[in-house]
Image (cartoon, helix red, strand yellow):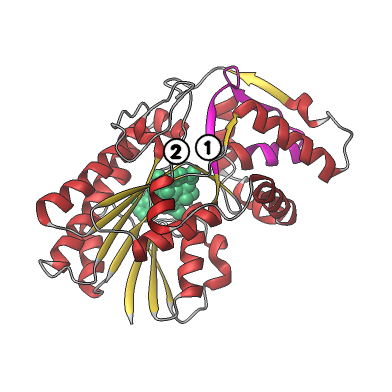
């Protein structure tokens, strides 16, 4: 039985990846390593916790001794590395926390994998999951390709860019068999409500202001998280070593248009008269270093591995909104406690 380590599997994307791998690959034993920070939640993967091919390990990737010990107990065949500090606004407040987890944490995993696999890389793979934000900002035209130069603008994207560079460097220097993907904004179930879509769904439900940065003209590409998990599965199994693949939704939206669409759907779902939720839109002071536009050219993964998004944005949003409306308890649990302090600090 192959032993696969997935880091950050109690978070948003990680929980979808862990669920997919545990259910789809009974021949793998999946170890989910997560520090359970504010963003990690075992409720996200409750449905698989009793599966015989699954083990949860609580631990911090920044702790080098712990990581080395974990690798000395288990001989992993593959690593899918998703654990990260992931929120740009938090990186502006506390950049060092992002360097620790995203850079040092990645280094610890790279070193542990390199030392464990020595020069016998047969059947081994280190998969680093990253973001399109490493490429910086686009103007009105153009798309990020795999050869676009890195140009990160936020402490978050700088820390992810740095970790990407180390992954490539370990491939070049030590021959570590890696694959790397850079993906656009994800949305879907189990998404912590500090990010745009779940934040606004939650605020609309609770009749709270919808804080839109600047003039709302920032543009992002959106991908349904389950389609990202499918792409990750494909790249892990069929991607070529030492290659990068961009993953995107072919689905660009200006923030303000997306917010209006959400308001419209939520009014219908909540039985409110048309235009009610739009009145909650409040323009707030811009985020410093805010990137104008991200857009992904996902033609390489499409051509080489045959991947493209399986659901339309309409379908994905419908499923996402229904999930939040049907999982009120999850939403209440994650927005109690420290979330309230964060929210007050961020938006008051
Ligand atoms: P998330 O914040 O929802 O989850 C991160 C998980 O990592 C949490 O469970 C958290 O507890 C865990 N974690 C954080 N620090 C840790 C540490 N020091 N040790 C062990 N575990 C730790 O993030 P996400 O949105 O699911 O993103 C997952 C990965 O995908 C990240 O690497 C992120 O950069 C990348 N990514 C995210 C998006 C997106 O739209 N969310 C898009 C592209 C790429």
Residue 132 at x, y = what percent? 40, 38
Judge left or right: residue 249 versus residue 206: left
Q: Can residue 44 be seen in the rendering of this structure?
A: yes
Residue 290 at x, y = what percent? 46, 23
Q: Earlier in the sequence, mark 2 or mark 1?
A: 1
In what element is the residue under mark 2?
Answer: loop
Give the crowd class for mark 1: few <14, some 14-19, many >=20 residues within 10 Å: many
**Marker count (numbered):** 2
Q: Nearest the camera: 76 or 335?
A: 76
User: How many angstroms separate mark 2 from mark 1 (CA)?
Assistant: 7 Å
Q: Quadrant of the C terminus?
A: top right
Write the start and end of the magenta stretch as one range: 199-222
The residue at 16%/51% (across/down) is: 170
Residue 186 at x, y = what percent? 53, 45
* Residue under pointer 2: 296
The residue at 37%/55% (across/down) is: 304
Res. 96 image quadrant: top left
In what element is the residue under mark 1?
Answer: strand
Give the crowd class for mark 2: few <14, some 14-19, many >=20 residues within 10 Å: many
Q: Is 156 rendered above or below residue 102?
A: above
Q: Can residue 38 be seen in the rendering of this structure?
A: no
Dots 2 and 1: beta carbons under 8 Å? yes
Q: Quadrant of the N terminus?
A: bottom left
Residue 68 at x, y = what percent? 20, 63
* Residue under pointer 1: 221
Confirm whether the magenta stretch covers residue 215: yes
Q: Nearest the camera: 288 or 141?
A: 141
The residue at 72%/53% (across/down) is: 328
């Amino acid at each position: 039985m192959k032993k696969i380590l997935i880091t950050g599997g109690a978070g948003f994307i990680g929980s979808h990846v862990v669920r997919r791998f545990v259910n789809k690959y009974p021949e793998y034993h999946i170890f989910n390593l997560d520090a359970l920070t504010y963003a990690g939640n075992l409720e996200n993967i409750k449905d698989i916790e009793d599966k015989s091919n699954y083990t949860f390990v609580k631990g911090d990737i920044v702790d080098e001794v712990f990581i080395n010990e974990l690798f000395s107990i288990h001989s992993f065949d593959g690593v899918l590395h998703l654990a990260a500090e992931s929120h740009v606004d938090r990186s502006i407040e506390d950049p060092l926390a992002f360097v620790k987890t995203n850079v040092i944490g990645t280094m610890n995993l790279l070193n542990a994998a390199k030392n464990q696999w020595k020069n016998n890389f047969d059947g081994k793979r280190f998969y680093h999951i990253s973001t399109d934000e490493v490429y910086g900002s686009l103007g009105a035209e153009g798309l990020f390709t795999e050869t676009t130069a890195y140009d990160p603008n936020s402490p978050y994207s700088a820390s992810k860019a740095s970790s990407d560079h180390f992954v490539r460097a370990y491939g070049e220097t030590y021959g570590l068999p890696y694959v790397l993907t850079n993906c656009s904004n994800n949305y879907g179930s189990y998404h912590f409500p500090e990010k745009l879509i779940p934040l606004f769904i939650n605020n609309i439900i609770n009749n709270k202001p919808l804080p839109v940065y600047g003039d709302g003209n920032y543009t992002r590409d959106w991908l349904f998280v389950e389609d990202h998990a499918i792409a990750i599965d494909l790249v892990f199994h069929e991607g070529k070593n030492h290659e990068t693949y961009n993953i995107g939704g072919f689905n660009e939206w200006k923030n303000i248009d997306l917010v209006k669409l959400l308001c419209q759907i939520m009014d219908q779902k909540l039985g409110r008269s048309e235009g009610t939720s739009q009145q909650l839109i409040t323009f707030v002071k811009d985020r410093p270093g805010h990137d104008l536009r991200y857009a992904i050219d996902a033609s390489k993964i499409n051509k080489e591995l045959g991947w493209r998004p399986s659901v339309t944005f309409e379908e994905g949003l419908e499923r996402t909104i229904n999930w939040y409306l049907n999982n009120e308890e999850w939403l209440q649990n994650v927005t109690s406690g420290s979330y309230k302090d964060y929210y007050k600090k961020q938006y008051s």
